Image (tube, helix red, strand yellow):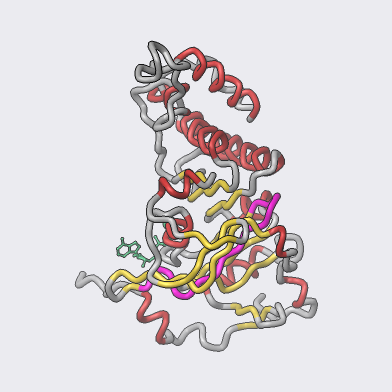
């Protein structure tokens, strides 16, 4: 294990044509006091792919995603969507640009029904009733469209669109959150550990949903700890460590052990894409030290 690879150059995922890049970022930085959450990181997702983002706890995966979705404003760096530089000031800006995010914590409203949840914050209203001022919610249309959306995504386990979300299983709730993202995410869908709270069968359903969304033309960023899951559905794997992207590899030419090696720092990727055993892995360098929050006294 951890021997330098003889066919090492193939580990690196091939570079895309510029026209295929949907979203990219370069030199992103985000500091919280002494903690560097994002350390000059780059990012790139292409049309038609599931890009997995993997990394140890605290590597800065969620912070990176927050920077891309307007949930945090980076201290430095640039972000481009469809080749144009963007400056999101909040999640609303990203949503308006067609970027939807699904979080690990089930972000649904349990006391509302499925249709209402799908249209949360963006309800459909009836055509100008009594002039233009009074526009009532169009529950019928929302229910019809919600049912169509679940159908399109093949979410078969939900039978009644008027069911309160609080009565659904964890997997079904996450399916509602994913369906909502798929409904409004026209450019990009980002999922931060969407299966972390789910069982095996429920995770399976969410994974199937992810590939269906990709096959319908919207690229997906999937943050996940689950290597078999990543290797099953990712087209490329972005490896994040100590706040930055350290490698982009192909699951077809790279092994799980190698990806874990890159995550922990046991392996490093050279400029030519070769994977080499790291000689400095046990010696905390300056970056590693400054990245970590201070030790707690206990
Ligand atoms: N709001 C915050 N305030 C202070 N430190 C933060 C904040 N958010 C994240 N961090 C720190 O930034 C680093 C990266 O965190 P995070 O992006 O959540 O990593 P990951 O998602 O890979 O586990 C961690 O050291 C974390 O403690
Ligand atoms: Mg995280």
Q: Which residue occupies 64% across, 68% down? A: 248
Quarter of the figure that contains the N terminus: bottom right
Camera-side residue of 86 and 202: 86
Position in image of residue 52 (x %, y %): 60, 56
Image coords of residue 226 (percent x, y):
56, 53
Magenta stretch: dominant SS? strand
The residue closer to the viewer here, 171 or 133, is 133
The residue under the point 41% across, 49% down is: 91
Quadrant of the image containing the C terminus = bottom left
- In the image shown, does 61 or 101 lie closer to the viewer? 101
Q: Does residue 239 appear left or right of residue 217 in this picture? A: left
Q: Closest to the observer: 191 or 142?
A: 142
Residue for point 64% across, 49% down? 219
Q: Is residue 32 visible?
A: yes
Question: Does the magenta segment cover residue 37?
Answer: yes
Q: Residue furthest front?
A: 131
Per the rendered image, the range of residues in magenta is 36-50
* 266 in magenta: no
> Residue 127: horizontal and vertical position, in percent?
47, 16
Q: Is residue 287 above or below residue 195?
A: below
Extreme residue in the right direction: 7
Residue 204 versus residue 6 in the image, above or below? above
Residue 232, percent across and down?
A: 68, 50
């Amino acid at each position: 294990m951890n021997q330098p690879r003889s066919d090492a150059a193939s580990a690196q995922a091939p570079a895309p044509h510029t026209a295929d890049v949907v979203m990219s970022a370069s030199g992103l930085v985000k500091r919280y006091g002494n903690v560097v959450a994002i350390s000059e990181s780059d990012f790139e997702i292409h049309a038609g792919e599931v890009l997995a983002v993997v990394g140890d706890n605290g590597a800065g995966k969620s912070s990176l995603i927050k920077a891309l979705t307007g949930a945090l404003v980076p201290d430095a760096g640039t972000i481009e969507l469809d080749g144009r530089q963007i400056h999101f000031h909040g999640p609303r800006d990203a949503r308006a640009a067609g970027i939807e995010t699904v979080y690990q914590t089930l972000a649904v409203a349990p006391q509302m029904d499925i249709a209402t949840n799908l249209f949360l914050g963006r309800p459909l209203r009836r055509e100008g009733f009594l002039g233009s001022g009074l526009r009532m919610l169009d529950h019928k249309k929302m229910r019809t469209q919600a049912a169509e959306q679940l159908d399109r995504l093949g979410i078969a386990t939900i039978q009644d669109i008027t069911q309160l979300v609080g009565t659904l299983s964890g997997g079904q709730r996450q399916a509602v959150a994913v369906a909502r993202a798929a409904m409004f995410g026209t450019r990009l869908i980002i999922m931060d550990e969407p299966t972390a709270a789910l069982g095996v069968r429920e995770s399976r359903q969410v994974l199937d949903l992810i590939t269906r969304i990709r096959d319908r033309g919207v690229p997906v960023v999937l943050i996940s700890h689950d290597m078999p899951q990543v290797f099953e559905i990712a087209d490329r794997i972005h490896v994040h460590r100590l706040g930055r992207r350290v490698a982009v590899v192909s699951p077809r030419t790279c092994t799980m052990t190698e990806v874990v090696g890159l995550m922990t720092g046991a392996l490093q990727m050279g400029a030519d894409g070769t994977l080499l055993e790291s000689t400095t892995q046990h010696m905390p360098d300056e970056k590693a030290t400054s990245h970590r929050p201070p030790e707690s006294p206990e």
